[in-house]
């Protein structure tokens, strides 16, 4: 994914921040422009052409949206995204998103620690991993018609990684709601891992005892 910049130590109130408050990451590297972040995207559910993701995602429906959190938990629940954004204070986190292809971007994300959501459902003692699943909607995401990939997109983390304070669920960037092409309405951001781990447009989160299969491991 990305090499982490230092997150803010104080949570912002649960409101939409209207602009990025930081101008650079902790090493002084300037933020990548909003134009670059929103027009050069890996989102195979739409297309493998990075510069075509934004126009193809323009009509993607992101409301209403629900995320189910279940598996090895005491209190499985389905949350509306709007309820999550009201419940958990939003924070700006400036992280470098690093792609295995050799490029990276410094992005001011807006979101909340994944740990806050997982603690809400009370993981059981047997839970050791967290499985994430993206939406499957080929009528809006034509890349999902491709037989080359086992859709829907799936990723996984160890539970300790998921509970780490740097791991967030992001709902926006540059102080604005998450653009469709960047994983709206809710995506994972894990700053010390390559970008493919930061799954987009999440609809399911499941705690498991066994390491979950991921899209890329399945086709490797």
Image: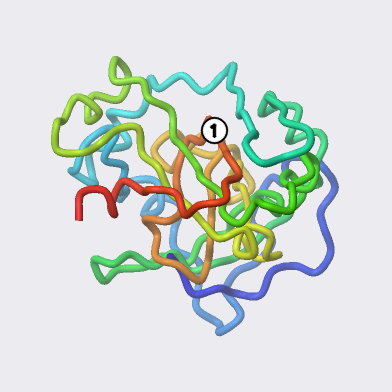
Q: Position of residue 204 (x, y in %)?
A: 54, 33
Front residue of 162/190: it is 162
Task: Give the residue displayed 61% in from the left and 80% down from the top.
Answer: 26
Element marked by disc 1: strand
**With 55 as the anchor, is 206 left or right in this view?**
right
- Give the farthest residue toward the left: 147
Q: Position of residue 111 (x, y in %)?
A: 67, 49
Label 1: how many residues lie within 10 Å, few (<14), some (14-19) or many (20+)?
A: some
Q: Quadrant of the N terminus?
A: bottom left
Front residue of 53/166: it is 166
Task: Give the residue displayed 55% in from the left and 82% down from the top.
Answer: 28
Which quadrant of the figure has residue 8?
A: bottom right
Which quadrant of the figure has residue 108?
A: bottom right
Q: Position of residue 178 (x, y in %)?
A: 54, 39
Task: Give the residue displayed 56% in from the left and 18% down from the top.
Answer: 63
Q: Position of residue 85 (x, y in %)?
A: 74, 35
Front residue of 16/93: it is 93
Task: Give the residue displayed 51% in from the left and 23% down from the top.
Answer: 62
**With 31 as the anchor, is 98 left or right in this view?**
left
Q: Which residue is mark 1?
A: 204
Q: How has the structure been colored for display?
A: rainbow
Which quadrant of the figure has residue 103?
A: bottom left
Q: How many marks?
A: 1
Front residue of 140/108: it is 140
Measured along the vertical axis of the image, is residue 210 above or below residue 143?
below
**With 79 as the anchor, is 119 left or right in this view?**
right
Q: Quadrant of the C terminus?
A: bottom left
């Amino acid at each position: 994914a990305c090499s982490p910049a230092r997150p803010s130590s104080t949570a912002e109130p649960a409101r939409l921040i209207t602009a990025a408050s930081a101008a650079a990451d902790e090493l002084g590297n300037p933020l990548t422009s909003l134009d670059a972040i929103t027009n050069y995207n890996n989102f195979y559910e739409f297309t493998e052409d990075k510069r075509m993701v934004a126009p193809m995602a323009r009509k993607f429906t992101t409301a209403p949206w629900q995320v189910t959190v279940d598996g090895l938990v005491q209190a499985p629940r389905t949350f509306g995204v709007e309820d999550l954004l009201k419940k958990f204070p939003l924070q700006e986190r400036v992280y470098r998103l690093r792609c295995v292809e050799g490029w990276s971007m410094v992005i001011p994300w807006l979101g909340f620690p994944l740990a806050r959501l997982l603690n809400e459902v009370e993981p059981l003692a047997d839970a050791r991993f967290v499985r994430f699943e993206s939406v499957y909607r080929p009528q809006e995401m034509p890349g999902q018609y491709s037989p080359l990939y086992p859709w829907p997109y799936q990723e996984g983390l160890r539970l300790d990684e998921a509970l780490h304070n740097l791991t967030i669920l992001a709902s926006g960037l540059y102080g604005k709601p998450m653009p469709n092409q960047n994983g709206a309405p809710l995506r994972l951001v894990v700053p010390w891992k390559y970008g493919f781990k930061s799954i987009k447009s999440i609809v399911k989160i499941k705690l498991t005892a066994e390491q979950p299969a991921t899209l890329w491991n399945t086709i490797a």
